């Protein structure tokens, strides 16, 4: 029930359900003249990316839990660059420019340089992966991502033996991100994150370029973001422009901002509470006053079998 399954290409996926729903919504948006921010009205990345994403990719991981409605996943976001309110990202990100986009690769690897996004992605096989996504704020969703394993990219970049960690950075652009030009930004920018090399190489770790069968909406981190399904959502950094290999644990945005509350590891763990709230349960979106939809949080967000070995012998209360 809560296990991840490795599926074959022949398995039936719930994809048809949301693809049909999208067609219905698209028709509706057209009838309404596209005046509102509906599921289809937002800006999308480049055509080549759309071409890439729109193919029939196999679903390689799934969970037997209902997929969160696309509306909730795209209108309830954390993306402080666009504002701290849950619907600031959808409201403020529609003119965000994702093409051209490049990613700078540096540090302990044999293939550093600045890569155009299309060179990183074109001709890459994508996969759909239906993952649980658990925010440290104790809400969660189930999202069908489209992407490729970070491990594939790392192999091409060819890290040296000095590379013990990989660090990521989000774009800095005061013209495009309202919170970056605010008098008092909510957090320091750039947003930075990192993984230990074995975490980065774990087959579950995904570089996502799409969701719900489409390219990523800007508010969800277009054109490319990380997805680490066994860790709290803040590890899953959006709009990546830099990848850096290093032999030291890199600083990360939330552990810098509040080190007692957020650590480098940030593994989903129902037995280690946040200092200000319990992590034993979560609100599975969508929720309402009459249906709070509270469910138990699973160790490593339900991916224990796949990742527990990475932390053997570690005190997870200390390395939270
Ligand atoms: N650059 C950047 N990446 C970010 C964030 C952010 O504020 N800025 N928020 C993080 C947090 S706290 C969460 S829960 C997820 C939310 O992803 P979603 O909006 O696609 O659900 O993005 C993460 N990545
Ligand atoms: Mo989060």
Image (cartoon, helix red, strand yellow):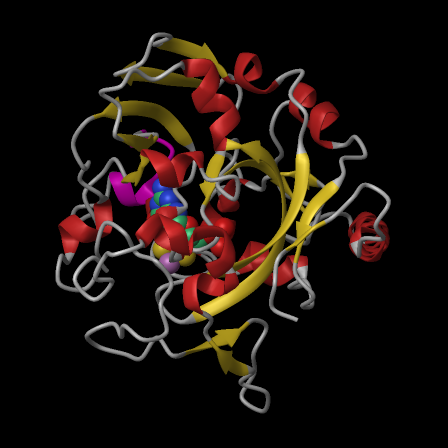
Q: Position of residue 54 (x, y in %)?
A: 76, 32
Closer to us: 192 or 22: 192
Residue 192 sits in which quadrant?
Answer: top left
Would you say 263 lies left or right of 303 here? left
Q: Position of residue 166 (x, y in %)?
A: 30, 30
Closer to us: 54 or 262: 262
Q: Residue at x 13, y 57 (%)?
A: 259
Residue 149 sits in which quadrant?
Answer: top right
In magenta, the rendered stretch is 173-180
Would you say 74 lies left or right of 12 here? left
Q: Residue at x 47, y 63 (%)?
A: 301
Magenta stretch holds residue 177: yes
Q: In the picture, which quadrant includes the N terminus?
A: bottom right
Q: Position of residue 203 (x, y in %)?
A: 52, 39
Res 276 seen here: yes
Q: Is residue 203 above or below residue 69?
A: above
């Amino acid at each position: 029930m809560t296990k991840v399954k490795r599926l074959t290409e022949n398995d039936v996926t719930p994809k048809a359900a949301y693809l049909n729903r999208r067609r219905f919504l698209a028709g509706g948006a057209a009838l309404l003249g596209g005046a509102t921010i509906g599921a289809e009205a937002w800006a999308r990345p480049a055509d080549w990316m759309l071409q890439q994403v729109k193919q029939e990719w196999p679903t390689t991981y799934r969970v037997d839990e209902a997929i969160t409605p696309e509306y909730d996943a795209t209108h309830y976001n954390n993306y402080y660059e666009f504002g701290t309110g849950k619907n600031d990202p959808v409201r403020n990100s529609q003119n965000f420019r994702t093409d051209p986009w490049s990613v700078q690769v540096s540090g302990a690897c044999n293939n550093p340089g600045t890569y155009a996004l299309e060179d990183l992605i074109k001709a890459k096989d994508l996969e759909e992966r239906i993952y649980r996504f658990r925010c440290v704020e104790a809400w969660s969703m189930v999202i069908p991502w489209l992407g490729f394993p970070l491990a594939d990219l790392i192999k091409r970049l060819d890290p040296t033996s000095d590379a013990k960690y990989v660090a990521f950075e989000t774009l800095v652009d005061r013209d495009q991100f309202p919170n970056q030009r605010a008098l008092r930004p909510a957090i320091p920018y750039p947003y930075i994150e990192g993984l230990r090399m074995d975490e980065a190489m774990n087959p579950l770790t995904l570089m996502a370029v799409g969701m719900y069968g489409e390219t990523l909406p800007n508010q969800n981190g277009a054109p490319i973001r990380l997805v680490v399904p066994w860790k709290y959502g803040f590890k899953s950094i959006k709009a990546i422009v830099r990848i850096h290999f290093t032999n030291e644990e890199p600083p990360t945005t939330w552990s810098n901002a509040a080190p007692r509350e957020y650590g480098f590891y940030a593994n989903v763990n129902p037995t280690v509470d946040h200092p200000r709230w319990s992590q034993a349960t979560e609100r599975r979106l969508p929720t309402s006053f009459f249906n709070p939809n509270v469910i138990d949080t699973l160790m490593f967000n339900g991916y224990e079998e796949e990742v527990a070995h990475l932390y053997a012998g570690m005190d997870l209360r200390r390395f939270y």
